[in-house]
Amino acid sequence: MMFLCRWLTRACPQTFFDRAHLSAGTPWIDAGLSSLMPAVSHSDSPGIKKESANSLSYEDFTMRIISAERLRQAVEALILSVSRSLPSDVRAALQSALAEESSVQGREILRQLLANADYAEATGLPLCQDTGTAVFFVEMGEDARIDGAGLQATLETATRNAYASGYLRNSMCHPLTRANTGDNTPISLHLDLVAGDGLRIRFLPKGGGAENMSRCAMFAPSRGISGIRDFVLDTVRQAGPNPCPPIIVGVGVGGTFDLAPTIAKKALLMPLDMPNPDPDAAALEAELLDAINRMPIGPGGLGGTRTCLGVRLLLRPCHIASLPVAVNIQCNAARRGEICL
Amino acid sequence: MSAIHLTTPLHYEDLQKLKAGDRVTLSGIIFAARDVAHRRMIEALDRGAPLPFELDGAVIYYVGPTPPPPGLPIGSAGPTTSYRMDAYAPRLYALGLAASMGKGKRSAELRAALQKYGGVYLGATGGAAALLARHITAAEVIAYPELGPEAIRRLTVDKFPAIVIYDAHGGDVFPPI
Ligand code: SF4
């Protein structure tokens, strides 16, 4: 057990950093960073022996092995279904927006979006032509490991395969030359190591239009809740009709410069009909939702009372000197889905 | 509200009649082009090279469609956000572009160009991409195939629904926020 723990703490962060930046066919991605990080060989980890096809043991301790092939198939199916159908809570929110919207043009847009969701589901066409950056949030039990190609490489392969077989759009390109990578990789992977041997994979294809309207700020703590509120509302105001309203607003407060946007994006995974477990966050969500829906943006930006389907807020402790705030805007094509293996 | 039916290429007189907020339907040939295709077109103009299509009276649709599944001319094909083309579009309007179609607001320079050259900016419903594709009956890559989804495509459209966002007289459909 002790050896295993040492192996895990040594190998896992290394694995994350090393592989997070590798992608077949796109050698220009972070080659510099990868070359700075020495590779760790798993095969010579001490005290580990493979017991059977789906477990790995050390003394009294067993690791669960998940086959890369099974993972790949499950993730491909996830990508295809998520790209073609709206989550039920988002659909329900569009339906109540239609019932409540006061403007004629706004109702017309909402009707089109609901009809689009029906049509996409019936035909298998993607909900939106922007099938997004493939963003994965993975919770992986420390007692599980992926056999063969490993987690990152398997997610990359599944993405490549599903975007090709599902006639989804390849939307990733070189940041300077703008040359398309041709297979929608690299993916964006957020990995949390958790207790146990489970594997939970959440997929959020993120379109560029709404992503471009997102912002992050590092406030002085004195700005407090009113600073957070003003920043969120100003971000939505600046975005106006651009991110395909009605929108969903993910807010991340706390963490560090890098983590605030990550938790803002993670907030977009929270179902719209699930109450925020944190009462302070819940109160701020309700206040922000009300304030956004009093802006005259409306569905499609054509005016109206239903600009926003929901605000989701995640909090995280931060440094005593900091108040990081990130706003990740999500569009009406708020696709997401998950699998547990 | 009934829609005004427009057939491409569009004429100056037709454009002058349009008002922000008018619903229109487009039929005929339109051209799909977005970010990199615009940069390439401007580079071509700088070199004095011909553009991949005739600009006079043309409609450019800011779209990068999904690939066509078997049996369909095109995949999902909704609008992309238009402001990204603001750096390039005024020059195209100056050369005869009649309309661009996308989603979202645009720069003061673009709006000034519309008034100066008598062009319009149309909006299609962002997010209604599968539904909108039903109005595209044929699609063919005519330039820059290496750009994949960003290649220039000639699209044949049938009653493609849109709304006039900015007209040629300074009209704007978006409420001030
Ligand atoms: S912002 Fe969303 S709905 Fe709009 S085009 Fe992009 S992915 Fe589609």
Image: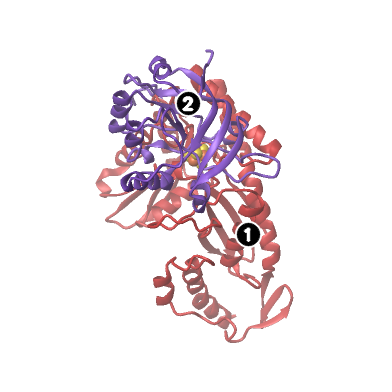
Cβ–Cβ below 8 Å for labels 2 and 1? no
Question: Which chain is drawn using purple?
Answer: B
For the residue marked with disc 2, what is the amino acid? Pro
Q: Is residue A136 above or below residue B2?
A: below
Work out whether disc 2 and disc 1 sit on a shared chain.
no
The percent coordinates of residue B21 (x first, y second) are: 43, 18
- Chain of the residue displaying label 2: B
Which numbered circle lies on residue A212? none
Q: Is residue A313 left or right of residue B69?
A: left
The percent coordinates of residue B61 (x first, y second) are: 48, 34
Q: Secondary structure at mark 1?
A: helix
The percent coordinates of residue A94 (x first, y second) are: 57, 30
Which one is nearer the viewer's eye here, B10 or A111?
Answer: B10
Badge 1 residue CB within 8 Å of ligand 1: no
Which numbered circle lies on residue A158? 1
Q: Which residue is mark 2?
A: B9
Q: Secondary structure at mark 2?
A: loop
The percent coordinates of residue B57 (x first, y second) are: 43, 27
Q: CA distance from mark 2 to mark 1?
A: 43 Å
Question: Furthest residue to the top?
Answer: B1
Which one is nearer the viewer's eye here, A318 or B138?
Answer: B138
> At 39% from the left edge and 29% from the top edge, which residue is drawn?
A291
Q: Is residue A285 left or right of residue A97?
A: left
Question: Which chain is drawn using red?
Answer: A
Q: Is residue A81 above or below residue A309?
A: below
Say whether residue A137 is visible: yes
